[in-house]
Amino acid sequence: MELNSLSAQANSSAETSLILAELQNGNVALAWTLTLLAGVSTVIGALFVSFATPERRKYVAFLEAFTAGVMIQGSLSGLNAEAKTLASASVSHTAAFWTVLVCFFAGAG
């Protein structure tokens, strides 16, 4: 069941910025289509996990780990640009990059 929530969060983080951009451009139909696509993807993932046999548990574990990696990458890329810009106001760009990276993973742990 954990994969269901991971899939939902991965889909939502990947789709959220695209959906918000389309809403700001006034394309409501495309935003709703992307939202529906994310929901259908989550349901398909939930069905896959629900019907997994004991022999496929390693495969499901691999997919959970992959989904967690996608979520971490999505969170980092979504927060990194603005955090680096704000940190660059006080320190050099290189120091800002490493500060943001270390603080991100320190907060995730």
Image (spheres, rainbow, N blue to C red):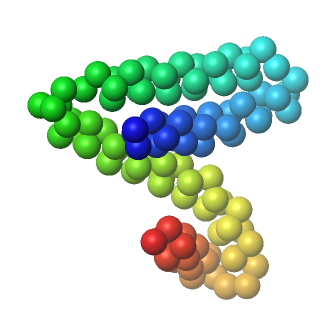
Quarter location, residue 4: top left
Q: Residue at x 74, y 23 (%)?
A: 31
Q: Residue at x 25, y 42 (%)?
A: 62
From the viewer's side, name the closer residue of 37 and 98: 37
**Res. 97 visible in picture:** no
Seen as rendered, the residue at the extreme left is 55
| Residue 94 image position (x, y, % from top left) | 55, 77
| Residue 95 image position (x, y, % from top left) | 57, 82
Q: Is residue 75 above or below residue 89?
A: above
Q: Left or right: where does residue 109 sit relative to residue 30?
A: left
Number of marks drawn:
0
Quarter location, residue 96: bottom right
| Residue 72 image position (x, y, % from top left) | 47, 54
Q: Is residue 49 above or below residue 103?
A: above
Quarter location, residue 80: bottom right
Q: Residue at x 50, y 27 (%)?
A: 42
**Res. 79 visible in picture:** yes
Q: Left or right: where does residue 94 sit relative to residue 46?
A: right
Q: Quadrant of the N terminus?
A: top left
